[in-house]
Image (cartoon, rainbow, N blue to C red):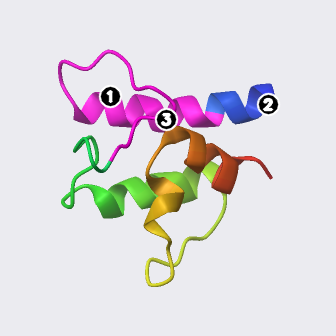
Amino acid sequence: MTERATTRIDVIKDWVLAKNEGRTDVAPDEDLIENRLVDSLSFVEFVFLIEETSGVEIDLDSLDINDVRTLDTIEKRFLSH
């Protein structure tokens, strides 16, 4: 893992923590959706953040929800290029 990738995933992790008062950490393999760290109201904003952070355009119509369930999968799918 590169320093650049670590920095970018930290941006996403910090956003999740800011949206969830009282949380101090998110495990890399924690399911963000199942654990309601990203809810339906913030999902589009979350995907936009991933786009902005990764530089990868994400088509919501063809998005595989499993690609954004954990910080690990987000990093592998969108931040490892």
Q: Residues within 10 Å of mark 2 (few under 14, many from 20)?
A: few
Q: Earlier in the sequence, mark 1 or mark 3?
A: 1
Task: Please provide percent x and percent y for residue 11.
Answer: 51, 34
Q: Which residues are magenta?
A: 8-32
Most extreme residue toward the bottom, as rendered?
A: 61
CB under 8 Å between discs 2 and 3? no
Task: Please provide percent x and percent y for residue 47.
Answer: 43, 60
Q: Secondary structure at mark 3?
A: loop
Q: Residues within 10 Å of mark 3 (few under 14, many from 20)?
A: few
Task: Please provide percent x and percent y for residue 12.
Answer: 48, 38
Q: Quadrant of the N terminus?
A: top right
Give left or right: position of 2 versus 23: right
Give left or right: position of 76 versus 39: right
For the point 81% across and 30% down, which residue is it?
A: 2
* Mark 1 or 3: the one toward you: 3
- The amino acid pointed to by label 3 is Asp
Q: Quarter of the image holding residue 24?
A: top left
Q: Quarter of the image holding residue 14?
A: top left
Give left or right: position of 51 versus 25: right
For the point 53% across and 59% down, which residue is it?
A: 67
Task: Between residue 21 and residue 36, name the one nearer to us.
Answer: 36
Task: Name the residue tied to disc 1.
Answer: 17
Please count the marks in the image.
3
* Mark 2 or 3: the one toward you: 3
* Mark 2 or 1: the one toward you: 2
Residue 25 part of the magenta segment: yes
- The amino acid pointed to by label 2 is Met
Q: Secondary structure at mark 1?
A: helix
Task: Name the residue tied to disc 2.
Answer: 1
Task: Name the residue tied to disc 3.
Answer: 29
